[in-house]
Image: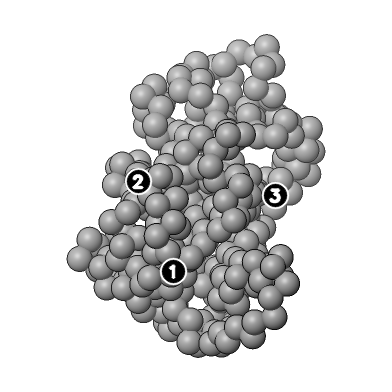
Amino acid sequence: MKIIIKPDLDREDVWIEAFGAAAPELECVVWDAAVDPASIDYAFVWNQGDGALRRFTNLKCIFSLGAGVDHLLRDPELPAGVPIVRMVEPELTRGMSEYVALHVLRFHREGPVLDEQQRARIWNELLTPTAPGRRVGFLGFGVLAKACARVLSGFDFDLACWSRNPKAVAGIESFHGPEGLVAFLARTEILVCLLPLTPQTTGILDQALFAGLPRGAWLINAGRGGHQVEADILAALESGQLAGAALDVFQSEPLPADHPFWPHPKITISPHIASVTQPRSAAREIVANIRRLQAGEAPHNIVDTAAGY
Ligand code: GLV
């Protein structure tokens, strides 16, 4: 039983060690190894490039290293009929809750304004509400957003979510579909985007969407750069429609050195590390899914290729 791996950040050795600990019987093959492609049973990939999986003619399942699967679904030569599994693992989920809690709390307590005041040596006692008086909204409400909402509900933030299809979660006001978006935006002071990138969500963070938020709202995007119209973010910050943005993802990554986001005082940048898949816990999830497949069962967290996530 062989799995070919193409992880990110040149971390092949870490992944080999993690798969070895989770399933000693699983043979881990690195991407550039001289191997008979027909002998590969499983592929574990990140940014593998279009057409790169075509040579594996006996694949039983493709595992995405990330929660997002846009790097797979955009491939016109993706092997047909092979199930795709997105990454759901407890430490990736935990990391995202940390990132979102960090920036929600920071914006909620006017962190960027306090930073500015400090730089200017201004002692101005800003008064902010406590969490029940702050309305946070999740655009996209999958596994990651739900975990973030659980953490924020510990502070009693006023939470809402918007998704394609209705989702009922106790204590969270839920909106869906294009008709629900207007009301969702109107009540959202801190907007957290954790959508999958699909043709329907590409460019969703644009001028029209920002105009639907209350003036002075904050944006947190840990989805994909493809969700954001970057010129519209700059214009919304300039006009005051947005008070600040925490961005982990960009149209072009790495963010080019001359990009206007870098020096912007109202933008906080992180280099697509809001949350990172952790090899030990992720390998355990993948191996559990391989065992399900071997037992003739469907793997967990299978992608609906028509929906795109
Ligand atoms: C990272 O971007 C992921 O999809 O997990």
Check if mark 2's residue and mark 3's residue have beta carbons within 8 Å: no
Q: Earlier in the sequence, mark 2 or mark 3?
A: 2
Label 3 C-beta lies within 8 Å of the nearest ligand 1 atom = no
Q: Amino acid at mark 2?
A: Gly
Image height check: is 104 above or below 66?
Answer: below
Q: Earlier in the sequence, mark 1 or mark 2?
A: 2
Q: Label 3 belongs to which residue?
A: 278
- Point out the frontmost of discs 2 and 3: 2
Q: Quadrant of residue 43?
A: top right
Determine the secondary structure under disc 3: loop
Q: Amino acid at mark 3?
A: Gln
Residue 26 x/y as whole percent: 69, 34
Could you tell me how far apart the alpha carbons at marks 3 and 1 are, in whole angstroms?
A: 33 Å
- Point out the frontmost of discs 1 and 2: 1
- Quarter of the figure that contains the N terminus: top right
Q: Earlier in the sequence, mark 3 or mark 1?
A: 1
Could you tell me how far apart the alpha carbons at marks 1 and 2 are, in whole angstroms?
A: 18 Å
**Circle 3 residues within 10 Å: few <14, some 14–19, many ≥20:** some
Q: Which mark is residue 217?
A: 1
Image height check: is 248 above or below 107?
Answer: above
Residue 33 x/y as whole percent: 69, 16
- Point out the frontmost of discs 3 and 1: 1
Determine the secondary structure under disc 2: loop
Q: Is residue 97 left or right of residue 204?
A: right
Q: Label 2 belongs to which residue?
A: 203
At x 48%, y 51%, the residue is 223
Check if mark 3's residue and mark 1's residue have beta carbons within 8 Å: no
